[in-house]
Image (cartoon, rainbow, N blue to C red):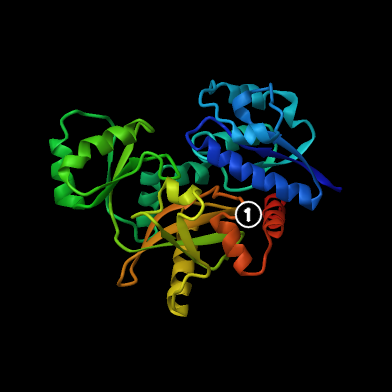
Amino acid sequence: MNNKLKIAVLLGGTSPEREVSKSTGKGIIGALLNLGYETVPIDPAYGDQQPDFGDWYYNSVQDSFPDDNFITCMNSGLFKEVGLAFIALHGKWGEDGVIQSLLELKGIKYAGSGVLASALSMDKAMSKVMFRHFDVSTPDWFVLNSYVKDNSGIIQKIEKEIKYPCIIKPNDQGSTIGLSIVDNQSEVEAAIKLAFEYSKTVLVEQFIEGREIAVGVVGPDTLPPVEIIPSHRIYDYECKYTAGMSRYDVPAKLSPKLTAYLKAEGLKAYNALGCSGYGRVDFRLTSEDIAYCLEVNSLPGMTPTSLLPKMAQCQGQSFEQLVERIIQIALS
């Protein structure tokens, strides 16, 4: 056994990305066990009454949990002698700086970005403000702060500033949950209504036709870009998590000059938000090779088949070696 430290893997949670988080957590737990670490899975959704993390847990779906279970969990004895938390949570309370702040209050080190960087990364509109400030190209956008039945003003703003097609999505969700591609004004109302089901703030964004490219960052280093070729128009939830719905070119088929440019832009976007540890930066690349940064994922998916491990594998690094590297970065 690796007796360096006891690692808690935080997974599950209460966000709409709960099932994705469980998959990420399972992958990280497997890697930690293979590395010989004492590993404790913790699902904050269950408070201080943790389940048996058998196959039933990963295959079961339970949609409703009280949010205050997070506080009960953090105040319990579950973290006794834990030296590091590996956060496998996605979405609200996982990627947005909340769990990071609670861990800091308990004096527990954790892998990944800090409180402010996590909050900025989760808030897509604020991310884009920072991108513009640091001269990172990003699609035009505007924000809706409240739902209204009369969308005539919004439609006029889209037609004047954004044009069709456009993207309408929750401002603080991941995995394309609640996202719609809108091709004309007749689709606006339904898209806005759907997005407001998942967030109090909605982003209306220019849709960039082109290729889907992601750049990974681990520590100070960038990884080879990957191109995602989804079966659908965009890399949506089904294409992300259904086997065979997407193809991946790793490394992406890009010129050396364009590869270097995308890696530099990815690192610039990552640093603009103050991210640390590891992350993934998502781009759309036009037919004229103009790159638009969509977002930074401060806690990207971490199963052996996720994008970041694919990039690391392209450099000859196994999934376990990637996990070990992230741990050592967190400890340092």
Q: Nearer the viewer, residue 25 or 292?
A: 25
Quadrant in which residue 199 is drawn = top left
- Marks counted in the figure total 1
Q: Nearer the viewer, residue 188 or 329?
A: 188
Residue name at image x 58 percent, y 35 percent: 99
Please, what is the three-letter code of the amino acid marked with disc 1?
Answer: Pro
Asked if residue 277 lies left or right of residue 181, the reply is right
Quadrant in which residue 190 is drawn = top left
Q: Is residue 89 visible?
A: no
Asked if residue 143 lies left or right of residue 246, the reply is left
Q: Residue extending furthest front?
A: 244
Tell me where residue 17 appears, x and y as whole percent: 50, 38
Q: Nearer the viewer, residue 16 or 233?
A: 233
Residue 267 drawn above or below residue 75:
below
- Check disc 1: other Cα within 10 Å, few if <14, some if 14-19, many if 20+: some
Residue name at image x 46 percent, y 52 percent: 296
Mark 1 highlights which residue?
Answer: 304
Tell me where residue 249 appears, x and y as whole percent: 49, 67
Residue name at image x 57 percent, y 58 percent: 308
Tell me where residue 80 appears, x and y as whole percent: 78, 30
Local secondary structure at mark 1: loop
Q: Is residue 330 visible?
A: yes
Tell me where residue 100 appears, x and y as whole percent: 59, 38
Residue name at image x 62 percent, y 59 percent: 219
